[in-house]
Image: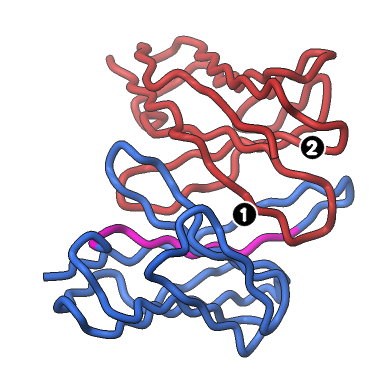
Amino acid sequence: DVKVTQSSRYLVKRTGEKVFLECVQDMDHENMFWYRQDPGLGLRLIYFSYDVKMKEKGDIPEGYSVSREKKERFSLILESASTNQTSMYLCASSSFDRAGGEKLFFGSGTQLSVL
Amino acid sequence: LAKTTQPISMDSYEGQEVNITCSHNNIATNDYITWYQQFPSQGPRFIIQGYKTKVTNEVASLFIPADRKSSTLSLPRVSLSDTAVYYCLVGRVTGGGNKLTFGTGTQLKVEL
């Protein structure tokens, strides 16, 4: 089974702190994604990466950056955490079937609270 | 990528068949459709994926009409444990680098 592991289940940080959210996948997937989920807003894409050191902005990249130094690891960085970044953060990696369909595998999520 | 529209919520009773329809009017020729299920405090998980006509697996069926402007997820004989949010997602067959964007999903509530 594919495993996507997020380093923390719950995290509490203070406003202005630099925050690192780590995600590791064990299936040698090329593509990895970071989403945030807030009540009533569904999943929103922050950043994604299709190769080591490659990244693309999603729909809400402001206030975030990412790092992909190794294929299995994709980090989300909050340069200066703010209270409006309190959210559930979900990491995913993807695989492709023979027909070309992409399938996402998600981690369990990190609930981040910024005080 | 095509924008998707789903009902916000649906209610059903145990044992009934549930059909959730997703509209994707701007779907392109090389786009496929995927459905995910999400329980509270968990990440979404893959249910079913298709490109055209009908796909069935052990969990659900996916019906896609000829014009592909919509798709219907069919859950046979639902139980309480099927209460979850269901997301429809349209992706492109390009081998990677796809900006996979979710819609707001459909909250399915199953009662006794």
Look at chain A in the picture and name its colour: blue
Q: Residue furthest front?
A: A62
Q: For mark 2, name the chain.
A: B
Query: Which residue is denoted by mark 2 in the rendering?
Result: B31
Indicate the quadrant where residue B40 lies.
top left
- Rendering coords of residue A105 (x, y %): 58, 58
Marks 1/2: CA–CA distance: 15 Å
Residue found at x 57% / y 46%: B101
Indicate the quadrant where residue A42 lies.
top left
SS category of the residue bearing label 2: strand
Nearer mark to the viewer, of 1 and 2:
2
Question: On the rendered structure, is B108 left or right of A57?
Answer: left
Q: Residues within 10 Å of mark 1 (few under 14, many from 20)?
A: some
Residue found at x 24% / y 70%: A10
Would you say residue A92 sits in the magenta stretch? yes
User: Up-down: is A104 above or below A57?
Assistant: above
User: In the rendering, which numbered label is found on residue A104?
Assistant: 1
Look at chain B in the picture and name its colour: red
- Rendering coords of residue B47 (x, y %): 60, 39
Quarter holding the C terminus of chain B is: top left
Q: For mark 1, name the chain.
A: A
Question: On the rendered structure, is A80 left or right of A61?
Answer: left
What residue range appears in magenta? A86-95
Residue found at x 72% / y 76%: A51
